[in-house]
Amino acid sequence: MSLHYLFPALNEDQRMILDSVEVFCAGELIGRAESIDHAAEIAPEVLEQIAELGLLAICIPEEQGGAGFDQASYHAALIEMARASATCALHVVLQCSGFLEPIARGGCAETSVFEAAATGTAMAALAAFEGEGGFDAAAISATLTERDGKLVLDGVKENVVGPADASEFLVFAREGAGISAVVVPADAAGLVLGAPLDRLGMRGVAARSLRFDGLELPMSRRVGLAGEAAGLLEETATRLMIALASIGVGIMQAARDCGARYATERQQFRRPIADFEAMRERLATAEIGQAAVLNLVFSAARGLDEGADVAQLARIAKTLAGEFAMKAADDVLQVYGGYGYSQEYPAERLYRDARYVALALGGDAATRCAIAARILPE
């Protein structure tokens, strides 16, 4: 990974986890990235190795059953994984930032659910979106009510992203005047699973809708306190934005590496195209983008470890990551020429995966509106 733009540098513990991820990515993951994309599925043996490395719960405290590393370690690992396979990095994000971290912060009496997801013996997905509402708590219309000592869930969730065979869903729903969170098993009576969508990019991770028709849950499946999960939802959105920015950095680094390598091999007018100013400008833009977003990501990650409010920084990092990743992916297509449009080369996969970074979590326009709202006078 290109960390020479990062100051201060990673410490010994952070470097240790990154070294193990680099070995895994170089020896196993990068060679499977194309097959994962074509099959629209992450092979079980790859999922097992990800879990064995402790990546699913990398930043969960040890006393809660995690690996106990800090946020900087987590995001360094994500960037390296995204260089090899953005889909696999997204899988880790959805399990960690989209499921385990919210439950660890909110608390859930059903501890077996947490333990299974942390070890990879069960997989989970986040159900927070409804229509085009993104992570806006005001847009949530699914309802949760208490009835005869049980929780009853009704409503619909869209764009539920996670493994196609997820066995648990973290669902945010309206309860009275507030927002609550619950963990719903995939085999619960009253849950109707929509068919997974055939996605353009990040194809190893599924997206579907969920419908809840009077679904009953034990009280032990509640995450946090009744009606007080709006803050948990907002913090989850912040952490997901930083994680998506990390994936964007990894995609940019992969695009830069592919472009630089091919530019020295491909020739025009009996010269490597790397000699031409236009090609060098494309490579330089990718380098500038990944260096800038890299530092935003680690600034936000370190802020999380210190308990700072990094929501605005997360929005900016995610927005820039989407823009620069798309630019880098488009430029590497240009470097490859007609070959870049072929599935025989990685450029087209990088392009499709980069588009997701900009579109995720409600899209770029919604994120920009949120950024502007923080700077406008009240």
Image: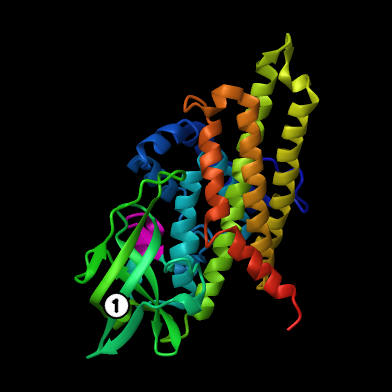
208 vs 353, left or right, is left
Residue furthest out toward the left? 189
Q: Is residue 204 magenta?
A: no
Q: In the image, is residue 116 part of the stretch drawn in magenta?
A: yes
Q: Residue at x 47, y 70 (%)?
A: 102
Q: Which residues are magenta?
A: 114-126
Location of residue 284 in the rendering, given as x and y in whole percent from the top left corner:
76, 36
Q: Residue at x 62, y 51 (%)?
A: 322
Q: Position of residue 256 (x, y in %)?
A: 66, 34
Residue nearer the viewer, 338 or 162: 338
Residue 147 visible in the picture? yes
- Vertical side of 31 occupied by 176: above or below: below
> Which quarter of the rendered picture does the C terminus lie within?
bottom right
Question: Where, by quadrant of the figure, is residue 276 drawn?
Answer: top right
Residue 80 x/y as whole percent: 58, 43
Amino acid type assigned to the residue bearing label 1 in the image: Asp
Q: Given the current orientation, which residue lies at the most extreme top position?
A: 270
For this view, does 107 lie left or right of residue 267? left
Residue of label 1: 154
Q: Secondary structure at mark 1?
A: strand
Of residues 256 and 208, the one nearer the viewer is 208
Look at the image and tell me whether residue 304 can be seen: no
Q: Residue at x 50, y 74 (%)?
A: 233
Q: Is residue 281 left or right of residue 112?
A: right
* Percent of width and height locating residue 125: 38, 61
